[in-house]
Amino acid sequence: MGKKVTEALQKLKHHGYKYTDKREDMLEFFGNYDGYRTASDVQEFMKERYDGISFDTIYRNLHLFHDLGILEATELNGEKHFRMKCDTSKHHHHLICKECGKTREIELCPMEYIEKELKGFRIDDHKFEIYGVCYDCQST
Amino acid sequence: MGKKVTEALQKLKHHGYKYTDKREDMLEFFGNYDGYRTASDVQEFMKERYDGISFDTIYRNLHLFHDLGILEATELNGEKHFRMKCDTSKHHHHLICKECGKTREIELCPMEYIEKELKGFRIDDHKFEIYGVCYDCQST
DNA sequence: ACAATAAACCGTAATTATTCTTATTTACAA
DNA sequence: TTGTAAATAAGAATAATTACGGTTTATTGT
Ligand SMILES: [Mn+2]
Ligand SMILES: [Mn+2]
Ligand SMILES: [Zn+2]
Ligand SMILES: [Zn+2]
């Protein structure tokens, strides 16, 4: 079991949530993929090992993981996409492959370069994403 | 009637689309607002002067305007938001007020600063948006 | 002005992603 | 073990958007 998954399960226990096989498998699913996946990707994966798994279970756990900071989320084509939270030590952004959801990190955060343009606004959040097709998906 | 609206109506005619009061009013709605509005904002506005206006009319025209480059769009909280297309002479990005949808321009485009980080990916698009609350909405 | 025609529109049903509800099952702690 | 809250399943509900069949209307040519 990957380190990220172990840490996530500990975080769940620490917050009083229960351990379940489904949760572990969902976490493994994300832990093994360096990119964004949709709820329906998760469902497809889970359906193979838990026949009749409920939408509710998928969504409830996705939200739980997100609330606990285990997953991070973005919205793309009207669908929420989730991935394992990146190393938070240095804030960064992503290139996202529209085919497979895999990401590459972008060191630069544009917020560092604009201060005076923001006066008067109360800033809550920002988004910088580049969309395209990764090398592997191009050769398909 | 504003310049943007006149130009838009000409563009419609030029592409063989018909003039209708509803289209003019929708365009006026956007022409008078420097920010993003949702389909339901449009519908609320249109319902007052055209009782029983159909969803189809709203969405069909929004798409038409978008396809013709009259409106630009972004996705926010699972809902598409539209605004009059900005002056295309210089590419730029926006601060967006989450309360009223109004925008402020950001001169800087981060794409200019990253070239080598993109090798191998085929870049199709990018998004840089800052979300917050504008001065007017803060004092409410 | 009048008629022909394609575009626009209405009313409503369908779709898609997501959330909610209620009853049942399960993890885990006492 | 057993009690209890948490987790789940099944399916209904919701919200935004899209699709469809029939009707109306803007435009073009007479
Ligand atoms: Mn990252
Ligand atoms: Mn602008
Ligand atoms: Zn940033
Ligand atoms: Zn840009």
Image (cartoon, coloured by chain):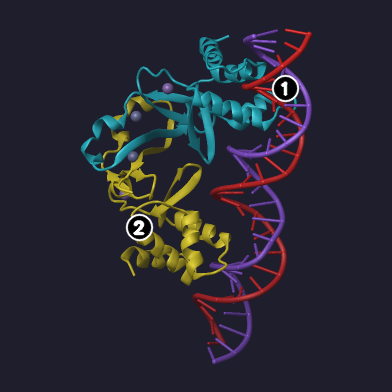
Chain colours: A cyan, B yellow, C purple, D red
Question: Residue A42, image x and y in percent?
Answer: 62, 27
> Does residue A140 appear anywhere in the picture?
no
Quadrant assignment for the N terminus of chain A? top right
Front one among A2 and A100: A2
Image coordinates for residue D29, horizontal then vertical, percent: 53, 81
Q: Given the current orientation, which residue lies at the most extreme left position? A: A116
At 62% across and 19% down in the image, what residue appears? A23
How many numbered marks appear?
2
Estimate how packed mark 2 is, as few (under 14), some (14 to 19) or many (20 or more) residues with alpha carbons within 10 Å: some
Residue type, numbered disc 2: Tyr
**Residue at disc 2, CB closer than 8 Å to ligand 2:** no
Where's the C terminus of chain A, which quadrant?
A: top right
Question: How much space separates mark 2 and mark 1, taking CA atoms?
Answer: 51 Å
Q: Which residue is mark 1?
A: A50
Q: Is residue A2 visible?
A: yes
Is A103 or B25 nearer to us in this picture?
B25
| Quarter assignment of residue B24 | bottom left
**Does B104 sit above or below residue B119?**
below
> Ligand 1 within 8 A of label 1's CB?
no
Q: Quadrant of residue D22?
A: bottom right
Residue A86 in percent (x, y) is at 44, 20
Residue B33 - label: 2
| Secondary structure category for the residue under label 2 | loop
Provide residue B116's location: percent of width, then percent of height: 33, 25
Does residue A11 appear left or right of residue D20 in this picture? left
Name the kind of residue labelled 1 in the image. Tyr
